[in-house]
Amino acid sequence: MFKKILVGTDFSEASDEARRVAIELARRLGAELEIVHVEEPLPAYAFAEGPLPDLPRLQEEVRTWAERQLEDLARGARASGVSTTTAVLLGVPANTIVEAARTERADLIVVGTHGRTGLERVLLGSVAERVVRNAPCAVLTVRQTPDATQGAKPKAAA
């Protein structure tokens, strides 16, 4: 059924819960897991006041930090017996997650939702919603719950 599961993370509590669900699904199904983090390019105008930093160096520092975080997450998945790879990608999160799923031939994408509603959702958009609309495979959205820190246990996958 699902042989390759891709889970996106922004290192938030919502994405942590999605990752826990993805690990459990991968463990139960004997699927491979890929944990991806998407960094958006740093715009030069964000530093308009004062001297401009060395953007390539700064982007590389952010990438190195993200790679270390992903490796820590992957270590936990591997300890659960799940074959796990990681990737730090550069781009627009929703588009890049969809493209990664296509490139990696993922059977399932797992993404966390922050549960934003109203104006906040209109202004900030929803990465999860855009992934659902454009994904080349099934998508499981995992909503952050108040007890997210206690772990998530999926009841069914579909």
Image (tube, rainbow, N blue to C red):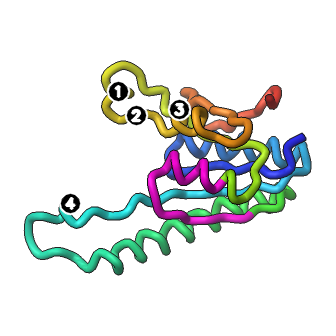
Dot placed on the residue nearer the N-terminal end, 1 or 3: 1
- Residue lying at 77% horizontally and 31% vertically, measured from the top left: 154
Q: CA distance from mark 4 to mark 3?
A: 27 Å
Q: Position of residue 80 (x, y in %)?
A: 82, 55
Identify the residue at the far top of this view. 118
Numbered range of the magenta stretch: 85-100
**Residue type indicated by callout 3:** Glu
**Residue 122: image tag:** 1
**Residue 125: image tag:** 2
Q: CA distance from mark 1 to mark 4?
A: 22 Å
Q: CA distance from mark 1 to mark 2?
A: 5 Å
**Residue type indicated by callout 4:** Ala
Left or right of 49? Residue 132 is: right
Labels 1 and 2 touching (C-beta < 8 A): yes
13 or 32, which is in the foreground?
32
**Residue 46: image tag:** 4
**Residue 22: image tag:** none
85 or 109, which is in the foreground?
109
Q: Tell me the quadrant of the picture where the N terminus can be found.
A: top right
63 or 73, which is in the foreground?
63
Residue underneath mark 3: 129
Labels 2 and 3 touching (C-beta < 8 A): yes
Q: CA distance from mark 2 to mark 3?
A: 8 Å
Q: Residues within 10 Å of mark 1 (few under 14, many from 20)?
A: few
Residue 153 falls within the magenta-colored stretch:
no
Q: CA distance from mark 1 to mark 3?
A: 12 Å
**Residue type indicated by callout 2:** Gly
Q: Position of residue 45 (x, y in %)?
A: 18, 62
The part of the image, by quadrant, that contains residue 144 is top right
